[in-house]
Image (cartoon, rainbow, N blue to C red):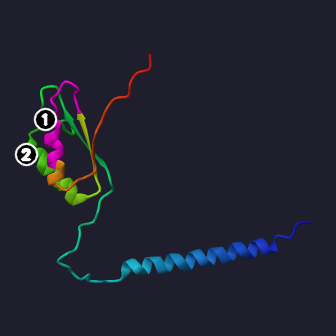
Amino acid sequence: MLDITPLIDIVFLLLIFFMVMTRFDEEDYKLDVVLPTASEAQPLISQPRELFINIDADGRFFVRGDERSITDIEEILEQTAADNPESSVIIRADKESKIEFSVQVMNACNKAKLSNYSISTAALEAN
């Protein structure tokens, strides 16, 4: 016959351990602490994400489905850099658009100090 007494002891020890640790974890959040301020403090960094900027054949810019001017895009990129300096920008330009429009977006990325940008391309279809 199998003796399960040591198994029951271990289960009770684990139960006691998790009950004690949960109690300490709650007390950390209940402490009334006034945090100091710092003039060089960085904002909380949000999750990294990709910002897509679409350029149609006529050179119009679209961000999140809305048509934007290059000035609007510069403001959006500055806000994106402030939220998370590691954000990536994907430029999706129509193949009929002039390269000048893509260069304007790349220049706006450089102004906003976002160095993680790229131009999206489609894969070649296998014949």
Residue at point 43% right, 81% down? 27
Q: Any magenta on residue 107?
A: yes
Q: Rounded to the nearest whole Å, what is the CA distance between mark 2 and mark 1?
A: 15 Å
Q: Which residue is mark 1?
A: 100
Q: Position of residue 88 (x, y in %)?
A: 29, 49
Q: Nearer the viewer, residue 37 or 20?
A: 37
- At label 1, which amino acid type do we have? Glu
The picture places residue 45, in percent across and down from the top left corner, at: 29, 62
Q: Does 13 sit left or right of 33 as displayed?
A: right
Nearer to us of marks 2 and 1 is 1
Viewer-proximal residue, 35 or 87? 87
For the point 21% across and 35% down, which residue is it? 54
Q: Position of residue 117 (x, y in %)?
A: 26, 46
Q: Are marks 2 and 1 in contact (CB under 8 Å)?
A: no
Which numbered disc covers residue 71?
A: 2
- Packing grade of label 2 (10 A; few <14, some 14-19, many >=20) is few
Residue 16 forms part of the magenta stretch? no
The three-letter code of the residue at mark 2 reads Thr
On screen, residue 53 versus residue 60, left or right, reads: right
**Sequence order check: which comes first, mark 2 or mark 1?**
2
Q: Residue at x 16, y 25 (%)?
A: 57
Question: Hey, which quadrant is residue 120 in on the image?
Answer: top left
Q: Which residues are magenta?
A: 93-108
